[in-house]
Image (tube, rainbow, N blue to C red):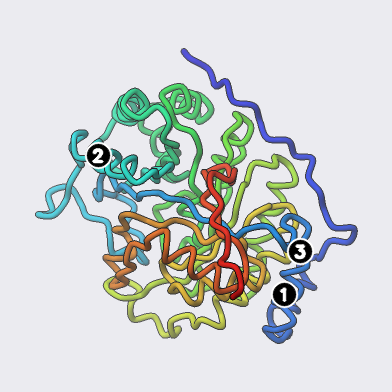
């Protein structure tokens, strides 16, 4: 069996002299005005990114290789069951054509995710990665959520570490943080009882970090959680990051209710102010995670722009394609490089295309003042 050749991330990170604890984080989150939270978040951001650093984005494409899923999350409008009229497993040639379109516009990252398909064998995933790696040797394959990988291990009967080694050997470059939602089992049992629990999600991430994979981390809020669940989620991420150093980024976004089983929950949809508070407190708490992403896809481009002034430093993807939130009635449109740069330049900062590792590929300087 081929083994991973990646170098594990170093857990040695630059940390502020005095770290915020969970009680203080909750107090700030509940009582501090938004302006104060934003200022505090900007100070933590300055530990990683100086005032002249560009705000970044990646040219990527979301490819959902299947919408067949047996997890039945209450917040998801995307999944289908085998036998449904619109259920699919995407043919390889279709996936290949989509990635070629990405290559043609100088894109660098494919986010490859599906549902938790109940019958696809592990060999499907390794073969898919191997073919993509052969056809697109320079594209970053940012592939499969912890839930998908946990199910691959269950289906194959192989240990989690071995499954990850096989995926890495086949061509997987990094692991997305999807399926985090709220990392507290009280909430997970109510909204996604068939999904991996908190410890399993974190366990996949820890194993991946140990094999040299850098991963993202996420939060979807605005369902049934309380404020303290949000803070607890952040400290779960911070604690694992102290141990492994493997999280490259954290991206929060709000639950999109339409067309989901949870559409009628009494809690109103999260507001833009709530989103900015969550993004800011995430930057304050996660003093060991270098990048905070602004989720313009769910929050809108202007709110994403505002998040850049309150602790976030990255606008995420140009996003050639998005299917999951679209099924929930949100219709983000693909942004051109010019549109993304304009939003960043309006803040008086340079814009830069990055890769999945947050290395700068190309800088787009802000226009000179006339």
Secondary structure under the numbered disc 3 in the rendered image = helix
Residue occupying the far front of the picture: 370
Residue, x 62% and y 58% (percent of image)?
Answer: 54
Residue 183 in view in this figure? no
Residue 173 position, x and y percent, is: 49, 33
Residue furthest to the right in view is 17
Q: Element type at marker 2?
A: helix
Question: Of helix, strand and loop, which one carries label 1?
Answer: helix
Check the picture and name the quadrant holding the C terminus. bottom right
Task: Give the class, few, some or many, for how many residues have Cα within 10 Å of label 1's Cα (few <14, many ≥20).
Answer: some
User: Looking at this view, is 39 or 78 the one in front?
Assistant: 39
Mark on residue 95? 2
Q: Residue 9: image x %, image y %?
A: 68, 35
Q: Nearer the viewer, mark 3 or mark 1?
A: 3
Tell me what residue is drawn at x 29 percent, y 58 percent: 323
Q: Are marks 2 and 1 in contact (CB under 8 Å)?
A: no
Task: Tell me residue 127's x, y (percent).
Answer: 31, 25
Is residue 74 depicted above or below 355 in this figure?
Answer: below
Q: Of the numbered discs in the image, which one, if any, rests on residue 213?
A: none
Q: In the rendered view, does 41 fall on the left or right side of 277?
A: right
Q: Residue at x 72, y 74 (%)?
A: 26
Is 281 situated left or right of 272 in this image?
right
Q: Earlier in the sequence, mark 2 or mark 1?
A: 1
Residue highlighted by disc 3: 44
Q: CA distance from mark 2 to mark 1?
A: 44 Å
Mark 3 and mark 1 lie on one chain; the one further toward the N terminus is 1
Q: Which residue is mark 1?
A: 26
User: How far, Cα to Cα, is label 3 from label 1?
Assistant: 17 Å
Pick the front one: 137 or 115: 137
User: Which of labels 2 and 1 is toward the front?
Assistant: 2
């Amino acid at each position: 069996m081929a083994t991973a050749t990646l170098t594990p991330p170093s857990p040695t990170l630059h940390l502020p002299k005095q770290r915020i604890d969970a009680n203080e984080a909750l107090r700030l989150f509940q009582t501090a005005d938004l302006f104060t939270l934003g200022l505090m978040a900007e100070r933590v951001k300055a530990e990683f990114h100086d005032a002249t650093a560009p705000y970044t984005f990646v040219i990527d494409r979301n490819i959902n290789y299947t919408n067949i899923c047996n997890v039945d999350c209450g917040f998801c409008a995307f999944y289908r069951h085998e036998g449904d009229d619109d259920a699919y497993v995407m043919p390889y040639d279709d996936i290949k054509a989509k990635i070629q379109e990405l290559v043609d516009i100088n894109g660098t990252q494919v986010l490859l995710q599906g549902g938790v398909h109940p019958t696809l064998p592990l060999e499907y995933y390794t073969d898919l990665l191997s073919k993509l790696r052969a056809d697109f040797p320079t594209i970053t394959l940012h592939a499969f959520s912890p839930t998908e990988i946990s199910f691959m291990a269950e289906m194959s009967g192989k240990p989690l570490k071995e499954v990850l080694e096989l995926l890495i050997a086949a061509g997987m470059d990094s692991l997305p943080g999807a399926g985090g939602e709220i990392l507290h089992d009280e909430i997970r049992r109510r909204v996604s009882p068939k999904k991996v629990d908190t410890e399993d999600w974190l366990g996949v991430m820890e194993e991946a970090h140990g094999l040299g994979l850098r991963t993202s981390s996420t939060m979807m809020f605005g369902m049934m959680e309380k404020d303290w669940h949000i803070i607890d989620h952040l400290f779960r991420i911070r604690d694992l990051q102290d141990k492994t150093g493997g999280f490259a980024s954290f991206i929060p976004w709000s639950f999109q209710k339409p067309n989901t089983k949870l559409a009628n929950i009494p809690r109103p949809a999260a507001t833009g102010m709530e989103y900015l508070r969550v993004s800011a407190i995430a930057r304050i708490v996660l003093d060991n995670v270098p990048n905070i992403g602004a989720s313009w896809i769910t929050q809108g481009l202007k709110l994403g722009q505002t998040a850049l002034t309150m602790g976030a430093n990255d606008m995420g993807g140009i996003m050639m394609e998005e299917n999951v939130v679209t099924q929930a009635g949100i219709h983000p449109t693909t942004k051109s490089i010019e549109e993304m740069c304009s939003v960043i330049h309006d803040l008086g900062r340079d814009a830069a295309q990055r890769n999945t590792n947050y290395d700068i590929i190309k800088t787009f300087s802000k226009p000179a003042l006339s």
